[in-house]
Amino acid sequence: MVPDSCSACGSRAVVNMSIQAAAIAEANDAFRAAIPFQGHQTYEGQVIFSGGVEEKGMLFVSLATKEVAEFTDFSQLNDPSGDHSFGVVHVNETEVFWAISLYNKTYDAAADDPLDDDDTRRVLTIYLPHEH
């Protein structure tokens, strides 16, 4: 729940970044966890696999998807913003990166309000480090 106004100054224009990051993290986690089950009903989006990941074959893609969906090892070091938008997993000893970007409904610009589930779409990209 994001407060209606800043607790310090009362402004409705001020965004509490910690609260916003926690809400985005919760949505990002739910979105990722639902990937193996054809997606999430509330948090809509798509998954994109890089060419390097796809070249490793369908089994690798499936294992990478599972690892990304189950990832929970967030820390200040790998998630400084606290929004759970990036992670690193290992599949058959291969390091795999993943990142979530938040877009508008038409995927042509960043989400205006990342907490508006009706107008925000997530794009999860799963890729190899050298493709960054």
Image (cartoon, helix red, strand yellow):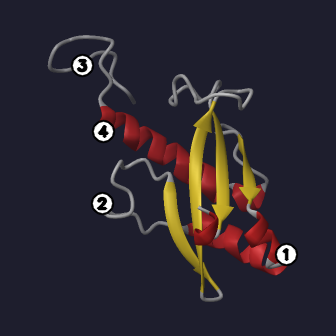
Q: Residue furthest bottom?
A: 93
Q: Is residue 36 above or below residue 20?
A: below
Q: Position of residue 115 (x, y in %)?
A: 50, 29
Q: Which residue is mark 3?
A: 6
Q: Is residue 44 above or below residue 76?
A: above
Q: Which residue is mark 2?
A: 76
Mark pair 1, 3: CA separation: 48 Å
User: Residue 58's mark?
Assistant: 1
Labels 3 and 4: the sequence-earlier one: 3
Q: Nearer the viewer, mark 1 or mark 3?
A: 1
Q: Which residue is mark 4?
A: 18
Question: Amino acid type of disc 4?
Answer: Ser
> 101 and 42: which one is in front?
101
Mark pair 2, 4: CA separation: 13 Å
Mark pair 3, 4: CA separation: 12 Å
Q: Nearer the viewer, mark 2 or mark 4?
A: 2
Question: Amino acid type of disc 3?
Answer: Cys
In the displayed structure image, the side of residue 128 where residue 28 appears, left or right = left
Labels 4 and 1: the sequence-earlier one: 4
Q: Position of residue 47 (x, y in %)?
A: 73, 53
